[in-house]
């Protein structure tokens, strides 16, 4: 920190400099009367030691790998090991997706990330009427353990870590993964990976909910408890701001609403009798890397610091690993343009770089063609190469938190930290995240920001290259990846065959046992594991739970 | 207020897709432009959409799909509208819809398809100029 004399000198010089500028600005004004970032934070012309003068280094930043983890969760960060390069992928049948996974692993990807189709995410089998038109479209279709066996065929589950974007039926897909591993002779204790398992953001931003909040939170805490014993290396939840941001929130809202959800999960687990340091270290997070490069870097640092203070001060965690916010990042899908799609390669590169400078643990880079369809192989490869270029060529990985100490980054980190905290206080007043969602507060905040953002584009206040400036005439893209509608037919045949081959009496017994358990208080995971091993389908298991728990009814926030 | 009734729009999400940022932005823009918007929320079946459009006596149905299920759901909705004898409602679509799919969607009666990057003002103008009643 600077002494009084130095601060005084800078203040004096700064004043003179501003005065000199005043005259010049009258003749040659800046591009805009005021500059703000996406969170509405006003930005100064320049940041100086005066802005950092109040900074308490050890309290606000500390050293890498130490509380409050602002500078990173590991002491050596990427000098030790690069982030996990993990491309989200899945489409069509389990065979189709298995082929894509082996392509990605051969291309040097270091972790798998499973995209499930919508019927799977919402707990319907492929033969359900609401599954028409949706089977295999946005991800792989999984009806039973049979499909999961095919999905991971020839992929050794003790060698890869696997992230699964699955929420309402997360318990079932995790059970299937454990069962596949068992068939491969691998113990659940050796499995590494993540289930998203974050239902609150489904209500507020993503939409693949099934059950109401209360039973959903119970399933989640059952998973926490089961995994702390049986699958100790598994990340039991990935508390996600990604979709909140995609739905239109600002950076500050992304941090605030995600951490508010995190608080709700911790409270639910404590209420269920778990110890904060038993499940705390397995909580993980998932953020968006959006366009405003420096705001994003500050966002990641602020989020880490805020979570550390919440876990230590609010929940009295003692284990530093409980305070450590580990997170996955994906570049912002909503910023990809259908116009001049090759520009998206560059957008993604900037976004990915912000995630790395922000200290992410794993990263998905979007493909340039995703404003049209699921990505083709060449586009996916460029996206993966972008990460490899940052990791191996750019040099930013050779020192920890290289932007730490920048007057601007530190001031912005502080500002995002404070503003997100204010939002969390407001959510606390509303009774916590679940209650704020039930009142429509979070949804309204997000949709208002989305509308504001769109209006800014339409008024030309926000430039989107190729969309509202620098447009060209262009042809529409060819050879997009398409999922064959026949996938549903073949999947329905498989389902029929499965139901004729399995022990149906046993399936019936387990499903009724599951209903009884759902009505009571015991942990549902062991029974779900039995059910998937007996080849009960995802739809059957979800239906049993729907019978007991009912379905979520969303609140309207339009009009 | 003149004696002309407001344009009534059903804004809806057919199928299982949860991406509602776009349709909500459009709903807000249409309301700001003086239209009356009924937003159904997520997970509407074609039957529900057609039923609601008749009950609410709307002039426009705005469909949004980003999951790729438009190839099944859009034709199904148009088929049901025809079965019910509804032929004076303007049906428009949007979302992630490949250009090569648009001609066949127009053939079955989807009047226009709006992709990523569309201005909401353009949708407002389009609706005002193309009402069928």
Image: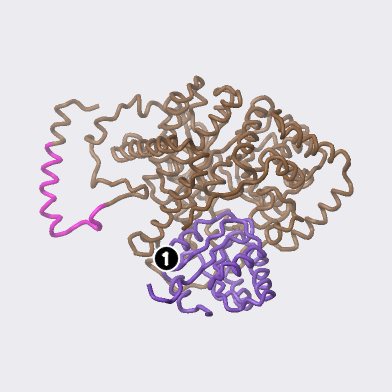
Chain colours: A brown, B purple
Magenta: main secondary structure equals helix
Q: Is residue A268 magenta?
A: no
Q: Residue A407, located in which quarter of the rendered image? A: top left
Q: Considering only vertical position in the picture, is A30 above or below A520?
A: below
Q: Position of residue A514 (x, y in %)?
A: 76, 36
Chain bearing mark 1: A
Residue at position x 66%, y 49% in the image: A122
Q: Position of residue A516 (x, y in %)?
A: 76, 34
Residue A341 visible in image: yes
Q: Quadrant of the N terminus of chain A?
A: top left
Q: Considering only vertical position in the picture, is A408 above or below B67?
A: above
Q: Position of residue B17 (x, y in %)?
A: 60, 56
Q: Residue B81, located in which quarter of the rendered image? A: bottom right
Q: Nearer the viewer, residue A477 or A239?
A: A239
Q: Is residue A20 magenta?
A: yes
Q: Position of residue A251 (x, y in %)?
A: 41, 45
Q: Considering only vertical position in the picture, is A399 above or below A67?
A: below
Residue carrying label 1: A466
Q: Residue A409, located in which quarter of the rendered image? A: top left
Q: Which residues are magenta?
A: A12-34
Mark 1 neighbour density, 10 Å: few (under 14) some (14–19) many (20 or more):
some
Horizontal placement of B19 versus A456: left or right?
A: right
Residue at position x 54%, y 30% in the image: A266
């Amino acid at each position: 920190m600077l002494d009084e004399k130095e601060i005084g000198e800078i203040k004096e010089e700064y004043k003179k400099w501003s005065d000199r500028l005043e005259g010049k600005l009258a003749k040659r004004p800046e591009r805009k009367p005021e500059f703000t970032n996406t969170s509405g934070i006003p930005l100064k012309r320049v940041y100086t030691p005066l802005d950092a003068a109040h900074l308490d280094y050890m309290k606000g930043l500390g050293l890498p790998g130490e509380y409050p983890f602002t500078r990173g969760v590991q002491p050596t960060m990427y000098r030790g090991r690069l982030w996990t390069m993990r491309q989200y992928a899945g489409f069509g049948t389990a065979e189709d997706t298995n082929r894509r996974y082996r392509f990605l692993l051969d291309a040097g990807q270091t972790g798998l990330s499973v995209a499930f189709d919508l019927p799977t995410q919402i707990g319907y089998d492929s033969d359900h009427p609401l599954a028409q038109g949706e089977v295999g479209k946005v991800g792989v279709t999984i009806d039973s353990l049979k499909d999961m066996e095919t999905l991971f065929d020839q992929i050794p589950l003790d060698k890869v870590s696997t992230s699964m974007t699955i929420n309402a039926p997360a318990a079932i897909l995790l059970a299937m993964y454990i069962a596949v591993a068992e068939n491969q002779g691998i113990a659940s204790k050796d499995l590494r990976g993540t289930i998203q398992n974050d239902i609150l953001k489904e209500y507020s931003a993503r939409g693949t909910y099934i059950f109401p909040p209360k039973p959903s939170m119970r399933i989640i805490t059952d998973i926490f408890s089961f995994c702390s014993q049986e699958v100790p290396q598994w990340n039991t939840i990935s508390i996600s701001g990604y979709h909140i941001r995609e739905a239109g929130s600002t950076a500050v809202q992304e941090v605030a609403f995600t951490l508010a959800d995190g608080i709700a999960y911790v409270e639910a687990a404590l209420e269920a009798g778990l110890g904060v340091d038993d499940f705390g270290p397995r909580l993980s997070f998932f953020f968006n890397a959006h366009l405003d490069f420096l705001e994003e870097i500050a966002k990641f640092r602020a989020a880490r610091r805020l979570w550390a203070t919440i876990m230590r001060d609010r929940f009295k965690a003692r284990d530093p690993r409980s305070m450590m916010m580990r997170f996955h990042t994906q570049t912002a899908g909503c910023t990809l343009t259908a116009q001049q799609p090759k520009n998206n390669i560059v957008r993604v590169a900037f976004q990915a770089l912000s995630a790395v400078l922000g200290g992410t643990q794993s990263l998905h880079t979007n493909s340039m063609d995703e404003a049209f369809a699921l990505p083709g192989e060449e586009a996916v490869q460029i996206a993966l190469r972008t990460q490899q270029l940052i990791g191996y060529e750019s040099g930013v990985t050779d020192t920890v938190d290289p932007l730490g100490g920048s007057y601007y980054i530190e001031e912005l980190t502080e500002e995002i930290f404070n503003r997100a905290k204010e939002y969390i206080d407001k959510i606390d007043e509303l009774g916590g995240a679940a209650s704020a969602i039930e009142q429509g507060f979070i949804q309204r905040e997000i949709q208002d920001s989305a509308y504001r953002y769109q209006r800014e584009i339409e008024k030309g206040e926000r430039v989107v290259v190729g969309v509202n400036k620098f447009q060209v005439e262009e042809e529409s893209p060819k050879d997009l990846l398409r999922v064959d509608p026949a996938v549903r037919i073949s999947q329905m045949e498989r389902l029929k065959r499965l139901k004729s081959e399995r022990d149906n009496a046993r399936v019936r017994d387990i499903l009724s046992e599951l209903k009884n358990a759902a009505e009571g208080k015991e942990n549902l995971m062991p029974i779900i594991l039995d059910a998937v091993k007996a080849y009960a389908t995802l739809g059957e298991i979800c239906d049993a739970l729907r019978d007991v728990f009912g379905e979520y009814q969303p609140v309207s926030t339009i009009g | 207020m003149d004696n002309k009734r407001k344009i009534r729009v059903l804004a809806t999400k057919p199928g299982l897709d949860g991406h509602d940022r776009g349709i909500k932005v459009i709903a807000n823009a249409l309301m700001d432009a003086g239209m009356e918007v009924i937003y159904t929320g997520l997970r509407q079946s074609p039957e529900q959409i057609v039923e609601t459009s008749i009950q609410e006596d709307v002039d426009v149905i705005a469909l949004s799909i980003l999951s790729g299920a438009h190839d099944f759901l859009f034709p199904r909705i148009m088929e049901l509208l025809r079965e019910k004898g509804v032929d004076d409602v303007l049906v428009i679509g949007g979302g992630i819809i490949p250009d090569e799919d648009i001609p066949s969607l127009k053939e079955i009666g989807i009047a226009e398809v709006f992709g990523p990057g569309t201005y909401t003002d353009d949708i407002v103008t389009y609706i005002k100029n193309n009402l069928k009643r």
